[in-house]
Image (spheres, rainbow, N blue to C red):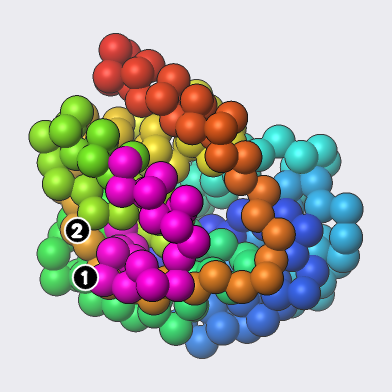
Amino acid sequence: MNKICVVIPSFNVEETVAEVIASVNQFIPRNDIIVIDDGSQDRTAAFSQEMGIVFLQNRTNQGKGASLKKGFHHAIQNHYDAVITLDADLQHDPLEIPNFMDCYFQSQADLILGDRTGDFSHMPLDRQFSNKMTSLIISVLTGTRVRDSQTGYRMIKTDALKKISLISNRYETESELLVKALLHGYRIAHVPIKTIYNNQQSHIHRFVDTLRFLKIVGLSLVKG
């Protein structure tokens, strides 16, 4: 029996975090749901703790990557076989978790990526362009076709996480993990997911995060 947990990085999502946890709990026990609050200034921490899940916290805002790494460390320390990551703002539908688990058991891939490319109609044009460009760059540099490099909805084997050293702390961490996994020869698979955008404020800074992406990809290629 595989031991699977869900890691949910959270920052100022008091309006959605409880709903996300309740939806995830339809498939994953609460003691296997790990919420990492990244120094939120609203009631995200309080609402999360009320749900009876595993709660971790960055006392100050350190970035999504730092939260993911804290969640990954917890998963490894507690001997989970795989981790599902999704966002706490309802841009990832928890009802699609069974699709990831089916792919995990059928394909035995090391990293499963949620793939929104079948439905870009709801994605802002600048995000479409950014996603296509980063996916193309990673595909060319690693020699592996990547359809949706920017997706945060993923499933990763902890055996892979143990062997991949992550140095970044913000949104580029997801790209760093993907590039290093491919360079290590880990197998990837794709699962179609819905493209969901709501009125939540984006914490992505296009220009700065693009520079961080280019820097971390370059470092990943040099150091492996």
Q: Is residue 206 left or right of residue 139?
A: right
Q: Quadrant of residue 140?
A: top left
Q: Is residue 161 left or right of residue 184?
A: right
Residue 119 colored in magenta in the image: yes
Q: Horizontal and vertical percent for residue 104?
A: 23, 66
Judging depth in this view, the residue of 94 and 76 nearest the camera is 94
Q: Horizontal and vertical percent for residue 36?
A: 67, 53
- Point out the tag, 2 or 1, that comes first from the N-terminus: 1
Q: Residues within 10 Å of mark 1 (few under 14, many from 20)?
A: some
Q: Is residue 141 above or below residue 17?
A: above
Residue at figure coordinates x 80%, y 64% from the top left: 44
Residue at figure coordinates x 31%, y 48% from the top left: 132
Q: Which residue is mark 2?
A: 189
Quarter holding the N terminus? Answer: bottom left
Q: Which residue is mark 1?
A: 103
* Residue 108 in sight here: yes
* Residue 83 in sight here: no
Q: CA distance from mark 2 to mark 1?
A: 8 Å
What residue span does the magenta drawing correspond to? 113-133
Q: Is residue 156 above or below residue 77?
A: below
Residue at figure coordinates x 19%, y 58% from the top left: 189
Q: Quadrant of residue 33?
A: bottom right
Residue 6 colored in magenta in the image: no
Tell me which amino acid carries mark 1: Cys
Judging depth in this view, the residue of 105 and 214 nearest the camera is 214
Tell me which amino acid carries mark 2: Ala
Residue at figure coordinates x 31%, y 14% from the top left: 223
Q: Decide: marks 2, 1 in contact (CB < 8 A)?
A: yes
Judging depth in this view, the residue of 207 and 179 nearest the camera is 207
Judging depth in this view, the residue of 78 and 164 nearest the camera is 164
